Image: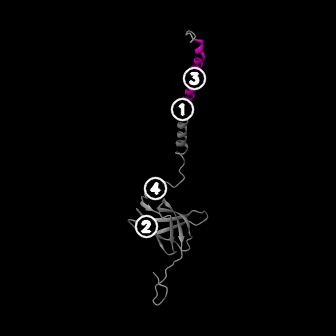
Amino acid sequence: MSNIPVYPERQPILLLWKGLVSFCFHMTNIFIRQLVLGFVFAILAFASVILFVGCQKNEGAAPTKNIQLSNVSIPSQLAVTATDIITLSGQGFEKNDKIKLTPASTGNQTYTLAVSAVDNKSVSFALPEGFPSGIYKITIVRGSEELVLGSTDIRITVATVVPDVPGMTVKGV
């Protein structure tokens, strides 16, 4: 710019213009650097997630090959008497399956129960005598394989059946 004549009255405007262009160029460089660094950071974060989360050791049971169930429904809470039969809906249960109830709280006994009835839409089983209320994980055991179905809060209630006796003032239903 030294070859171009600059009128003295326009020199402050030219200096302002050069400063503005220099500032814009500097800010563009900073923006591009931040954009590139952000992109690199995103790629590294994604790779870290894939490497460290996606490759975790599977500490659960081995994948099941023989247990194929569908449409299984586990209620969040079951209120039953000690003699009730519990029925879970679902398809694919077999007569030799066992139901394993594992308590959520440690130190309590795990119960492995025989299936009492199976049809194409459900499986039924009875609780053992003295079974305590609590939250239990429900697992199907077929041979050496296990499949966790879910968990439920099993509450043992007192039977409240009032018998209908002729001549009495309380009427059972």
Question: In 3D space, how far apart are the residues under numbered discs 3 and 2 (Cα atoms)?
Answer: 78 Å
Q: Quadrant of the C terminus?
A: bottom left
Tell me the residue that label 2 is attached to: 123
Sequence order check, earlier mark of 4 and 2: 4
Q: Which residue is mark 4?
A: 64
The image shows residue 104, relative to residue 164, as above or below, that is: above
Identify the amino acid type marked 4: Thr
Residue furthest toward the left? Answer: 120
Seen at 46% across and 90% down, the residue is 167
Q: Nearer the viewer, residue 117 or 14?
A: 14
How far is disc 4 from disc 3 in space, using C-alphas? 68 Å
Specify the segment rendered in magenta: 7-36
Instruction: Tell me the crowding category of disc 2: few under 14, some 14 to 19, or many 20 or more residues within 10 angstroms, Cα based.
Output: many
**On the image, numbered disc 3 is attached to which residue?**
20
Between the C-alphas of marks 4 and 1, the distance is: 46 Å
**Residue 19 within the segment the image draws in magenta:** yes
Check disc 1 and give the amino acid type.
Answer: Leu
